[in-house]
């Protein structure tokens, strides 16, 4: 509670103690002791929280990143992640040093945290931060990005989050030995119970701040057209890659249309369909994707690049997307209600497949800013909706039963 006086904290603590005691129906003779214990505990928690806030006395964040050789893809993604409050605070407070299970140094996370510290330094004299050391360490862990050629921002984001998660995983790495036993469910099992079991199993091996923020769960529902058997498969995701509806160069589409296309029922012929559990053979079937578990931060990738046999092409269709109250509830479990998200960052790609450039737009306390490598300038909301939008970052604003527990 930054700026709160000691009297305000104490008053709030006393009021909270009284509420907790009255709600739990404590007897008068035990109430004084219980209130004393509660008061001491809550004051400690409030003071710790207050101290952490003081440690996070942040600058404006309006600091650019130096381009160290075709690294605009890195700069744009880092700026978007830097404006993810949960990840930023986690890095700046070095919380990962206490959470991670590995005794080895989290070299990439340490380097990433130093970059973020430079971007959010209070009264910093530098107008840009050099990410060269961070990028060098990243390339050591992911040799695929070696060299100085232009890279894809979404691919970089996936690799970066995966490596950061590996370093700060709260679970001890357990080597898989042999084939694992398959979890058995009742014949008419509930999909939600199966999903919860799969998610629990995932967290037993992969549990980190990265998972807390970015990981969700997809449900793939398969329906056999021969015997009408239904089956479900659940997979963890850190971003949604949405197909682009086909339009003429002058016609625009909405994010809702991209989501509808992503989740629409797909017909599978025998050659492309998986084995039906009941028919014990490949049959014609239909498949539908939905979101079973919604993450705190949902990263939406607009799949503008498509590959043909001979070339790669880029779609320049303008996709309109909401800045506030994106409701993903219709793409979740039945009757899950509204699941609302607000936009806080956009990674843009301009140019062609071979000659492109990445920039970012990020929401600040007093509006939006445009990040073009070392340059940072204000930008209005009506300038965000362009045909260059490539990766969208949304923060959840309401709670829901289908979220991570």
Image (cartoon, helix red, strand yellow):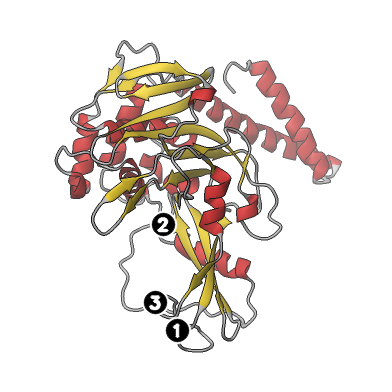
* Disc 3: which residue: 180
* Disc 1: which residue: 282
Estimate the spatial distance between the alpha carbons at disc 2 and disc 1, rounded to whole Å: 33 Å
Q: Secondary structure at mark 2?
A: loop
Image location of residue 284, percent across then percent down: 50, 80
Number of the label disc, if any, that sits on residue 204: none
Q: Earlier in the sequence, mark 2 or mark 3?
A: 3
- Of residues 9 and 113, the one drawn nearer to the viewer in this rendering: 113
Instruction: Report the mark closest to the observer, 2 or 1.
Output: 1
Contact (Cβ within 8 Å) of mark 2 with mark 3: no
Q: Earlier in the sequence, mark 2 or mark 1?
A: 2
Estimate the spatial distance between the alpha carbons at disc 1 and disc 3, rounded to whole Å: 24 Å
Image location of residue 320, percent across then percent down: 53, 37
Q: Residues within 10 Å of mark 2 (few under 14, many from 20)?
A: some
Q: Is residue 221 above or below residue 140?
A: below
Q: Secondary structure at mark 3?
A: loop
Q: Residue furthest left?
A: 147
Contact (Cβ within 8 Å) of mark 1 with mark 3: no
Q: Earlier in the sequence, mark 1 or mark 3?
A: 3
Q: Residues within 10 Å of mark 3 (few under 14, many from 20)?
A: few
Q: Is residue 39 visible?
A: yes
Q: Is residue 294 visible?
A: no
Image location of residue 184, percent across then percent down: 53, 80
Q: Is residue 373 above or below residue 84?
A: above
Instruction: Report the mark closest to the observer, 1 or 3.
Output: 1
Image location of residue 74, percent across then percent down: 29, 35
Q: Is residue 51 above or below residue 167?
A: above
Q: Residues within 10 Å of mark 1 (few under 14, many from 20)?
A: some
- Of residues 266 and 334, the one drawn nearer to the viewer in this rendering: 266
Q: Is residue 114 above or below residue 137?
A: above
Estimate the spatial distance between the alpha carbons at disc 2 and disc 3, rounded to whole Å: 17 Å
Number of the label disc, if any, that sits on residue 206: 2
């Amino acid at each position: 509670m930054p700026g709160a006086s000691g009297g305000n904290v104490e008053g709030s603590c006393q009021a909270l103690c009284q509420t907790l005691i009255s709600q739990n129906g404590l007897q008068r003779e035990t109430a004084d002791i219980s209130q004393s214990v509660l008061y001491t505990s809550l004051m400690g928690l409030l003071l710790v929280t207050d101290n952490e806030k003081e440690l996070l006395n942040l600058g404006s964040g309006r600091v650019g990143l130096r381009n160290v050789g075709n690294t605009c893809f890195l700069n744009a993604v880092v700026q978007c992640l830097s404006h993810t409050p949960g990840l930023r605070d986690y890095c700046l407070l070095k919380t990962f040093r206490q959470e991670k299970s590995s005794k080895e140094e989290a070299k990439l996370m340490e380097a990433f945290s130093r970059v973020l510290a430079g971007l959010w330094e209070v009264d910093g004299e530098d107008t840009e931060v050099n990410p060269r050391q961070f990028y060098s360490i990243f390339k050591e862990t992911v040799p695929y990005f070696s060299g100085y050629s232009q890279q894809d921002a979404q691919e970089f984001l996936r690799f970066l989050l995966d490596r950061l998660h590996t370093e700060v995983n709260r679970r001890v790495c357990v080597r898989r030995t042999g084939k694992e036993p398959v979890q058995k469910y009742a014949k008419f099992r509930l999909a939600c119970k199966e999903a919860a079991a799969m998610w629990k199993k995932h967290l037993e091996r992969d549990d980190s701040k990265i998972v807390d923020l970015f990981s969700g769960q997809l449900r793939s529902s398969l329906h056999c057209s021969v015997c009408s058997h239904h089956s479900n498969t659940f997979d963890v995701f850190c971003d949604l890659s949405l197909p682009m509806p086909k339009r003429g160069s002058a016609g625009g589409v909405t994010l809702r249309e991209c989501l509808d296309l992503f989740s629409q029922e797909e017909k599978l012929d025998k050659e492309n369909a998986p084995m039906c559990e009941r028919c014990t053979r490949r049959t014609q079937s239909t498949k539908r994707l939905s979101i079973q578990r919604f993450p705190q931060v949902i990263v939406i990738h607009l799949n503008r690049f498509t590959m043909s046999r001979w070339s790669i092409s880029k779609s320049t269709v303008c996709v309109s997307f909401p800045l506030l109250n994106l409701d993903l509830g219709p793409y979740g479990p039945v009757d899950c209600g509204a699941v609302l998200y607000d936009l806080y960052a956009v990674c843009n790609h301009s140019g062609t497949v071979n000659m492109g450039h990445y920039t970012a737009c990020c929401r600040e306390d007093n509006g939006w800013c445009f990040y073009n490598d070392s340059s940072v300038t204000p930008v209005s909301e009506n300038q965000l909706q362009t045909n260059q939008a490539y990766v969208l970052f949304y923060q959840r604003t309401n709670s829901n039963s289908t979220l991570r527990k």
